[in-house]
Amino acid sequence: MKTILSLLLLSPGLLLAELSVPHFFADHMILQRERAAAIWGKAHAGAEISVAFKGKSAATKADADGKWRTQIETGAADATGVTLTISAGADKIEIKDVLVGEVWFASGQSNMFFTMNRVPAYEALIKESKHPALRMFNAPLVTAADDQDDIEGVWAASTPEMVPDFSAVAFFFARKLHLDLGIPVGVIKSAWGGKPVETFTSREALNTLPGTKALVDAMLKDEAAFDQAKAQAAYETKLEQWQSTVAAAKGKSAEERKRLPKKPDAPKRPLLTEGKPGVLFAAMIHPFTGYTMRGAIWYQGEGNARAGAVPYDQTLPLMINDWRKRWGDDFSFYFVQLANYHAPSTAPGTPDAWALLQDRMRLVLDTTPKTGMAIINDVGEVNDIHPKNKKDPGERLARWALAKDYGKELIYSGPLFKLSSVKDGAIRVTFDQSGAGLKSRDGGALKRFEIAGADKVWMWADAKIDGTDSVIVSSTEVKAPAAVRYAWAANPEGANLINSEGLPASVFRTDDWDDVEIQVDTAAEERRAMGVEIRALATELAKHDRKSPEYQALNQKFQALMTKFKASAPKK
């Protein structure tokens, strides 16, 4: 025994790895019906692995790294819990109460993370939510520099005790599928608020697009320059300043306290910072790649609705195709278009990064197969980026799935722009998904249509429904119309075009003019960045003796930056 132990200690590679599987292969899980469901894990190199489930079996062998993967036939939907057994020699894992049904992956930022317990109006529904065959796996918020193979979490059934912590959008999506199809539905939720689409995409994919490659390059540059000790010292200085400010504010009025600065965040290396390119993909998406499922639902975009962002009709398809490649499956992908938000605009032709992103979401439907979009420009709130109404977004996503994945005959979307034609001083706009006919939500005249001629001067337009699927748009002030836009604003108050199902029409434009982009003042951005660097250098200089070599080197850099900063000042 000692000889063997000594040999194992000298040769760690000979240590026998315990049979294991990722956390999401666990009690109460749901496997995708009518498919060969992928199961994988680790064991010692060369171990013979067998998997048994509902009378079916599969076998494979662990590779030199101890990794193994196989597939097991699941059969028809089954709401009766069954044990899935995985064996490797004397080692055995029993996963209990496994159901067979429909599996979906839910991701995005805060509006997907948003939980049921945040809406008081859902209290009664939560108390009634006793659906043992509707289950959700909630992934924690974690970051990683490299692709991970596992992530913590547990499967939980829909009960009054567990539903409060369920993603509201994912719950309403799954609930509608569960009730309409009458079979088990499982959702794996992995989302993090306030993050851009690029962090959910692999860096390998991001490097294939010039705009996103630049983001990766900038992050890697920051990573190479990151100094934990210096960052920690700067943080402690800022923290002391913040603590002093807060202490000084004691006894002041509530209005004055509202203006207090935010507590500084502890420093993180870029590759471990949530929101940076590829970071959340590595930690929160990669572990699940390959889990057999029907498709994914997505609610994100707020983090990309800004001037100068890489166009969303490039970045979202990049992520979708990246995921599909890594899953080895062209699964369905349905996303939520951004809701109306901010104060209503009042002038036609106003550039708006929010509306531009909404429209670029619409374009993804035409460029990326097996995608769908829930239009929700009627559920938003002026002062809250997190609308409380999560039932409509979830159920509108479910409409796409019911129609496209489950063969249900129904109108699955609000009106979507199809084509336009100019005739007799007006523009006819034709829509898909009009149902039995287009109509006005409030019974009044259609609003929020804009029209312009070749001069690109936008005017509010008169718009009248013609037939079941068309709207005639005109203006006495635009004699030779060239283009139409609808609901072109972050909050297009009054937009009221709907179909027979009451579903709202999406924002759209018939033109491809360049007047939609908000111009970014790059000089001002660079000057702000220099200001931040100057303040950081000044803090660092204060820590050194003026005669020290460190001070001399830092001061030389400080003076050079100050000269550049002064030279960049706007000319009076």
Image (cartoon, grey):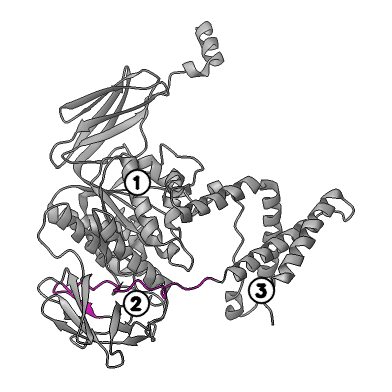
Quick one: SS at disc 1?
helix
Which comes before the other along the chain, label 2 or label 1? Answer: 1
Span colored in magenta: 496-520
Please state which amino acid type lies under the numbered disc 3.
Ala
Quarter of the view holding residue 397: bottom left
Does residue 140 appear in the picture of this structure? Answer: yes
Q: Residues within 10 Å of mark 2 (few under 14, many from 20)?
A: many
Quick one: SS at disc 2?
loop
User: Does the magenta segment cover residue 498?
Assistant: yes
Number of residue marks: 3
Q: Report the residue at 65% width, 48% height from top.
A: 225
Q: Residues within 10 Å of mark 3 (few under 14, many from 20)?
A: some
The CA span between labels 2 and 1 is 31 Å
Observer-nearest of 489 and 92: 489
- 368 shown above or below 512: above
Please state which amino acid type lies under the numbered disc 1.
Trp
Residue 176's x, y, as percent?
19, 58
Quarter of the C terminus within the rendering: bottom right
Which comes before the other along the chain, label 3 or label 2? Answer: 3
The residue tagged 1 is 323
The residue tagged 2 is 488
Looking at the image, residue 472 sits to the left or right of residue 567; the answer is left
- 480 shown above or below 263: below
The CA span between labels 3 and 2 is 43 Å
The residue tagged 3 is 249
Residue 174's x, y, as percent?
23, 55
Which comes before the other along the chain, label 1 or label 3? Answer: 3
Q: Report the residue at 35% width, 32% height from top.
A: 21
